Amino acid sequence: MIKIYNTLTRSKEEFKPIEPGKISMYVCGPTVYNFIHIGNARPMIVFDTVRRYFMYKGYDVNYVSNFTDVDDKIIKEAIEEGTTAEAVSTHYIEECRKDMAGMNILPATKNPQATQEISGMIQMIQTLIDKGYAYPAADGTVYYRTRKFQGYGKLSHKNIDDLEAGHRDIKVTGDLKEDPLDFVLWKPKKEGEPSWPSPWCDGRPGWHIECSVMSKRYLGSTIDIHAGGEDLIFPHHENEIAQSEAANGVPFAHYWMHNAFLKINNEKMSKSLGNFFTVREISEKYDLQVLRFFMLTTQYRKALNFSAELMESAKAGLTRITTAADLLRDRISKAADAPLTDEENKKLQALDGCRQNFEDAMDDDFNTADAITAIFDIVKFINTETDENSTKAYLDKIHSVFYQLSDVLGLILDKKDDDLDSEIEALIEERQAARKNKNFAKADEIRDKLLSMGIQLKDTREGVKWQRV
């Protein structure tokens, strides 16, 4: 039984899908005006892992995550670069996809882009006007009547009267609104900005309406799970609920999931503090598998602190796991093709316990920190309960469990780069030849070159072994 902490009810609830065996899941994606930063990476990794676990449990997951490709930040970047907003967003969508691939994020079922869904937004806005939940102002701006929606504040647990008294975070300046709490659904174009024709004016949509429309089109009026960073709870997700439920007349999402903030050296990440890191910058120092592993060492609802020391610790931890995978593969390649022994069957009961601990952790609101502990238990099992006398049948069973559970976390245990591997093997042969000829200076030079490539050599009785470090 999977339990999810539901932001809407502030409690852990047993997950029950709308349709047995199927899950509809919407995750708010990035605004594409620059390279994604490591704060963007956390929800991407977290909810990809949630999706993977549902798939492991046998669910068919329809996973939709959008790109916001029309926004003030994109327009500002286009002006600074002397190009179009479309050119900026197209470029950074492609760069985002590269970073996501590096983090081993599964491709979404659908990645809708806001600019391709304008007609649906106009239709939903018109529905809201027809139902009295929205109104066009004299300048063509369309506003949502926040007070008309009876459930406003139910996700963020904010009281609407308190908002009017002091909270400015959803107030928009302007004298054309009926109420200072009303928010924008459609805004008139400005000179040089991208725009689309509408019944009210040439303009573009407000941010919140995008996700309401894309979620409905690709998943339906009511979905199982809506997810994103906790910074989106208010006002973005609150406004999505107001729009969607007013327009569609049914509950929007049954479960709301939000990951906690990422801090840098215990401070909020910001360019002004000089602690702002993009995923691309991190990839220049670390394999992005290390970033993914680091993100999963803390349960997603807990604040996560990023530092060089913690990344080094994550790198070391991941290396322990991949080294065990290397050892296991090596033993499988040399193992006798014999049936399981009675002793091996008994040992496998402990492996079953590791799998159960992993599932218990993930069933409890996707506690990846405890799931990783179960992975390390398997690493210990491989190191202590296998040897050169183990049967292939026994080792294959360990391999199946180890790789299956690691894949749930998106960990790649034996990523191969054939060209690089060939280069490494050639350098090792060259080093061996130099040592045979007693050219130890040359041999040391090659060893140092390999080390600079992240390759560590180990001389064994079976010959020279190498591993990535």
Image (spheres, rainbow, N blue to C red):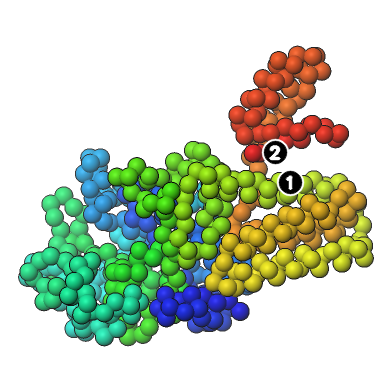
Q: Percent position (x, y) of residue 21?
A: 58, 78
Residue shown at 70%/20% (left/top)? 444
Q: Residue at x 65, y 28 (%)?
A: 450
According to the picture, the residue beneath numbered tag 2 turns out to be 467
Q: What residue lies at 36% left-to-right and 53% top-to-bottom? A: 268
The quadrant in which residue 368 appears is bottom right
Question: SS for tag 1?
Answer: helix
- Asked if labels 1 and 2 touch by Cβ distance under 8 angstroms, the answer is yes
Image check: 409 left or right of 45?
Answer: right
Which amino acid type is marked by label 2? Answer: Gln
Residue 216 image point, x, y percent: 37, 74
Q: Is residue 461 above or below residue 162?
A: above
The answer to whether any part of residue 127 appears in the image is no
Please name the residue that numbered disc 1 is placed on.
Answer: 326
Task: Label 2: state its secondary structure.
Answer: strand
Residue 396 percent coordinates (x, y): 80, 57
- Name which residue type carries label 1: Asp
